[in-house]
Image (tube, helix red, strand yellow):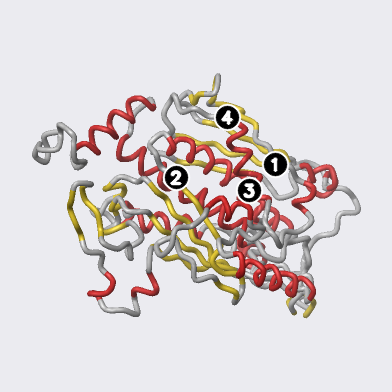
Amino acid sequence: MLRFLTAGESHGKGLVAVIEGLPAGVPLRADEINVQLARRQGGYGRGGRMKIENDRVEFIAGVRGGLTLGSPIALSVPNLDWVNWTTRMDAETLGPDVVKVTRLRPGHADMPGVIKYAHDDVRNVLERASARETTMRVAVGAVCREFLAQFGVEIHGHVTAIGDVETPIRVDQVPIDWDRVEESPVRCADPEVETTMIAAIDAARREGDTLGGIVEVVAYGLPIGLGSHVQWDRKLDGKLAQAVLSINAFKGVEIGDGFGGARRRGSQVHDVIEYGEGGWSHRTNNSGGTAGGMTTGAPLVVRGALKPIATLARPLPSVDFVTKEAVPAHYERSDVCVAPAAAVIVEAMVAIVLAEAFVEKFGGDSLGEMKRNFESYVATYAPGSHYWKLEAGDV
């Protein structure tokens, strides 16, 4: 079983994560994780916070000599902005000049959070509810990416829409130049649409507003059979959907041509199965690489829709939690559009779910043991293997 926990507040001393369940022997370097953290910090539309932070991970436990030990892995990332918040975020004593946040922000965790946890200061909610927490999800996802790479799995993501500006480019329709996506300030594969996306972000910033978007993530190189059909909570689609919707501001998710397929007939949607020299395949990939809660061996395609950031420079009308009076919502330094960064976060969550599925299917205490299990399993359905003609249950 693979699991992880994160801890830390947006303006606290730092962020931490603990990962349990990865086998021993996985090559791991801080630089590889830092590359992913830098990708998360980038993107057009980010706010001033990203000019302060320079996220760098430190291994606290579970790694020695560049290899995982099989024990829990502990990671930390310091908040450089902490020096500006010491009197307001100290764990024991707050400064005498600290003013409580009581004006609620529509669309944020503020109102339900203060009621649920009986707080009298919204900061006790917003600090943890902040998307700063996703720093550690990207760090954990980076660890999982290195693990998945040992099995030939690659994960990429791009932005398909910002506000009402959308590109028709999809991974299941045309080849995508991923190097081009990495160079794009909005992580868009379409140079012409990129320009319009940037203009839309600029317009929203001038008007004190924010924009949402749609991101698409694809995983290549997956075997057939990750996940399961036998119980609702083992279906890979369900785990992916929960993982994406757990990310701040995400309100919708689809696997493959999910919502589009609902508007077409079955004869136009279902992927015809074929078998040839290359083994099992499908003529199309409308299902997005899953069937019955399991991977089909085709590229896994996940799309997520995120709403506009809830903190507006031109605040919406709201209510003071203490006085109950009508007031403008609280303004906390924020971004205009996080869709480019969100694509990186979705990549990370997909990597975590897939790593969990690999551990469940091919579990072992060491990477070598897992690789042997993986190769033996793939050989049961892959052409050219001496296992190929064995009957089910013989391997």
- Alpha-carbon span between mark 3 and mark 2: 16 Å
- Near-viewer residue (157 or 188): 188
What residue sits right under mark 1 in the picture?
55
What residue sits right under mark 4 in the picture?
29
Q: Which labelled disc corresponds to residue 122?
A: none
Is 37 left, or right, of 64 in this rendering? right
Q: Amino acid at mark 4?
A: Arg
Residue 101 is situated, as x and y percent measured from the top left of the image, at 78, 62
Which mark is first along the chain, 2 or 4? 4
Q: Amino acid at mark 2?
A: Glu
- Alpha-carbon span between mark 2 and mark 1: 23 Å
What residue sits right under mark 2 in the picture?
154
Is 150 left, or right, of 292 in this rendering? right
Q: Amino acid at mark 3?
A: Arg
Q: Secondary structure at mark 4?
A: loop
Q: Quadrant of the C terminus?
A: top left
Which mark is first along the chain, 3 or 4? 4
Q: Residue at x 38, y 69 (%)?
A: 258
- Near-viewer residue (312 or 370): 370
Which mark is first along the chain, 1 or 2? 1
Crowding at dot 1, Cα within 10 Å, few <14 / some 14-19 / many 20+, comes out as: many
Q: Amino acid at mark 1?
A: Asp
